[in-house]
Amino acid sequence: MMDHSFFEKLQAIVGKENVDSTKAGRLVYSYDATPGFQSMPDAVAAPRNTREVSEVVKLCQEYKIPIVPRGSGTNLCAGTTPSEGGLVLLFKHMNKILDLDKENLTITVQPGVITQDLIKHVEKEGLFYPPDPSSMKISTIGGNINENSGGLRGLKYGVTRDYVLGLEAVMANGDIIRTGGKLAKDVAGYDLTRLFVGSEGTLSIITEATLKLIPIPQSKKTMLALYQDMEAAARSVSSIISKQIIPATLEFLDQPTLKVVEDFAKIGLPTDVKAVLLIEQDGPQELVERDIKLMMDICLQEDAVSVEMAKTESEAEALRTARRSALSALARLKPTTILEDATVPRSQISNMVKAINEIGEKYKLNICTFGHAGDGNLHPTVPTDARNHEEMERVEMAFAEIFAKAIELGGTITGEHGVGMMKAPYLEWKLGKEGVAVMKAIKAALDPSNILNPGKVFAKESRKRVVVSR
């Protein structure tokens, strides 16, 4: 319980100016980007360094206070909603780039560094950090690591975990540990680095990360393939991959999404077609030219009505920006926008798109679908209104069927958004009771008092999206 003595000790650790227990201050951090989940924390604190994080954790352990580590709150699984109250931990002071090592091709940063700031920083040096979540303008590296974020370049380059070489982390008892390092190879013991990446703040609190960099690609080309048949677009994705071409970006947008994005971005996107594929390739110029030509031919063979090349880099960047703005654009339609992610093997993209459309018709919902089609990660999105309880019931049932279909096709309930509270009821569908039991055992061993982001990943009885207030 947070009594007077707790607040006195907390202020002594981080400074009085870095503790906020006002109602207005707590309300700001009572929710994240996930619709339908909200809960008030008891206080908010912003430590200035790792030692202070450690001391705060020890204090919370003494008083049995839940801790919710939080970046910019852009996650879409209610992973940073303080569902059991407690202390929200902010990293606004721990936002420094500590070391850019060109000899080892690494960069070491604190968790509060903004993703796009890091990307721009290394590109000035001719280097490349590929993970690029759509929220990269405001999301933080710490949040990316906790959720194992993906992005438009995930097909070719992988996701956040593929670039995390080492971590500094504070454990539930306040111990500070380091994992990995600036190493190309390291098999000393369990791979704690990969265990912590994607653990959503339930196993440790990340205070520093060493990330892998690669040389920046020499050239890049971007094209837009237009379709009057969504399944033809999905077939094109499967055909491209089956021909052993791995583009840097292979994104899918259906017509409802296209119309909303064009109305939002106003860059001349075609809205009279059923779907588009945004395709990019990067690398040596000769390879890029060859792959773009092959992919253009494949799209036309799979009934694309036309394929258009971006004429300039600014035109290509406008297309990328428009794709990244899909959620913002869709959010203008109705008061509540529920965006989910379901991932299937790439060969099942066509079947998954068809199933999503059928499920939308079954539940009389307008489901807009877009996503990272090249890696099988689709984002079915429903504009709705949380005040319409009958429609919200249909939305929940529709998404449950979508997750079930993804698993049936050999997929998973989430490709990049994480489990948090939103997907917790469905985790057992994917892992089985035995798999969930293993995860719970790890959680209990590392955090026996369950103070690190409790209420996340593991389901409670209710499967419904609920608002929790304190």
Image: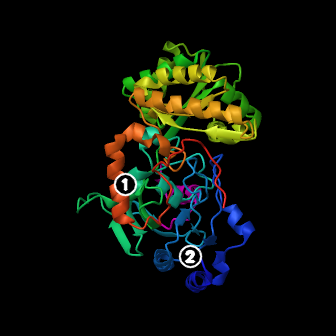
**Horizontal placement of 137 versus 193: left or right?**
right
**Horizontal placement of 10 versus 170: left or right?**
right
Q: Residues within 10 Å of mark 2 (few under 14, many from 20)?
A: many
Quadrant where the C terminus sits is bottom right
Marks 1 and 2, how far apart at CA: 29 Å
| Nearer-N-terminus badge (1/2) | 2
Q: Looking at this view, name the residue that lies furthest to the left.
A: 188
Residue 363 percent location from the top left of the image: 63, 24
Which residue position holds label 1?
440
Residue 194 seen anywhere in this rendered image of the structure: no
Between marks 1 and 2 in the image, the one whose residue lies nearer the viewer: 1
Label 1: which secondary element? helix
Is residue 403 a member of the stretch shown in magenta?
no
Q: Residue at x 66, y 26 (%)?
A: 365
399 over 46 or under it: above or below: above
Residue 16 percent location from the top left of the image: 65, 83
368 or 68: nearer the viewer:
68
Residue 50 seen anywhere in this rendered image of the structure: yes
425 over 78 or under it: above or below: above
Residue 271 percent location from the top left of the image: 71, 23
Q: Quadrant of residue 21?
A: bottom right
Is residue 125 a member of the stretch shown in magenta?
yes
Amino acid identity at mark 1 = Lys
Label 2: which secondary element? loop
Give the magenta range.
Answer: 109-130
Quadrant where the N terminus sits is bottom right
Which residue position holds label 2?
47
Amino acid identity at mark 2 = Pro
Q: Quadrant of residue 433?
A: top left
